[in-house]
Every structure is written in C-alpha cells, then in structure tokens.
C-alpha cells in the first residue's frame, strides 16, 4: 500500500500540469468550444439591470473571458463574463510587461465620438468655415 501511495505521489510531482489538455499553453483555442450569444449574455446581465443592451461580444485579451460591450441608459461600457458563465468581472485588465490598461483602451474605442456626426445646424461659426482644422466648443450660457 505504501508503494502505491509513493508511486502516485511521484507521478503527481513528476508530470507537469502543463501537459494537461485543460491548459491553454498547449495551443488550444478555448473559444472554439465555448460560446456566448448576445441572447445568453443579455439574459445573464438582465438580472443585474433590466435596461441593459448587449452591443458586441468578443474574446477578451485574457483567455477564458468574454469581453461584453454593453449599453444602459444611453451610456456605453464593458464588462467580462467567464467561459463557465458563472462569473461577471467588472474592472480593468492590465498588462505587466507593457503596463497598459487594456480595459481603458477598449472603453475609449467604444465611446469614441465621430466629430463629423455632431449636428452644427445651430452652431455659431467663428473664422473660416472651410478651414483645415476645426474646433468645436460646447457651452451653456446659463
């Protein structure tokens, strides 16, 4: 009995965990087997906010998470859902090497405003309206 226990303990410590197919280092793309539709994400997130709308779902920079672009009450945001669909992660993902906030970069992309779509019908134009560079100033006189 002692030999069996020792043999099992030796096998446990000698076979690295990276040989397991459950680890992504073996080159497998987990997002091929795991899916999350907009309807599933909406159902999961509606429990937290009934007004939520799922805009887009992509694989996050961190494996085993989906990045879910959302809109609620006219405001856009993003959150993360794990592949098991049990956990919601709301916060930032940082990289150690580049010291970058990946969530912030994605949020800025998501909320970017196209200046050509700003209505200027009632705008007060100062200077040459055909100038190469334009500056739009928003002001509330009250």
Image (cartoon, grey):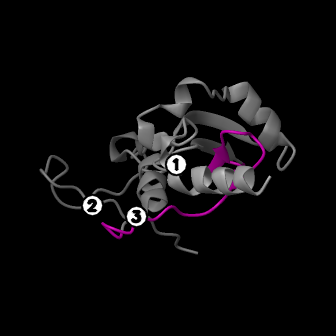
Q: From mark 3 to mark 2, how far is it between C-alphas? A: 35 Å
Residue 135 is labelled as: 2
Crowding at dot 2, Cα within 10 Å, few <14 / some 14-19 / many 20+, comes out as few
**Mark 2: secondary structure:** loop
> For residue 20, what is the image quadrant?
top right
Q: Earlier in the sequence, mark 3 or mark 2?
A: 3
**Mark 3: secondary structure:** loop
Residue 36 in percent (x, y) is at: 66, 29
Q: Earlier in the sequence, mark 1 or mark 2?
A: 1
Residue 15 is labelled as: 1
Residue 138 is labelled as: none
Q: Main secondary structure of the magenta part?
A: loop
Q: Is residue 45 above or below residue 108?
A: above
Say which of 89 and 48 sits in front. Answer: 89
Quadrant where the C terminus lies?
Answer: bottom right
Q: Earlier in the sequence, mark 3 or mark 1?
A: 1
Residue 31 in percent (x, y) is at: 54, 30
Q: Which residue is mark 3?
A: 95
| Pair 3/2: label in front | 3
Q: Which residues are magenta?
A: 73-99
């Amino acid at each position: 009995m002692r030999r069996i226990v020792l043999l099992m303990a030796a096998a446990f410590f000698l076979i690295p965990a990276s040989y397991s197919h459950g680890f992504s280092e073996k080159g497998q793309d987990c997002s091929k087997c795991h899916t999350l539709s907009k309807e599933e994400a909406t159902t999961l997130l509606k429990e937290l906010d009934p007004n939520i709308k799922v805009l887009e779902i992509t694989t996050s920079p961190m494996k085993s998470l989906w990045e879910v672009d959302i809109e609620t009450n006219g405001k856009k945001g993003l959150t993360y859902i794990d592949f098991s669909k049990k956990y919601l992660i709301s916060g930032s993902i940082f990289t150690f090497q580049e010291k970058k906030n990946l969530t912030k970069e994605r949020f800025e992309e998501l909320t970017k405003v196209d200046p050509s779509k700003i209505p200027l019908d009632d705008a007060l134009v100062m200077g040459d309206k055909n100038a190469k560079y334009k500056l739009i100033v928003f002001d509330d006189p009250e």
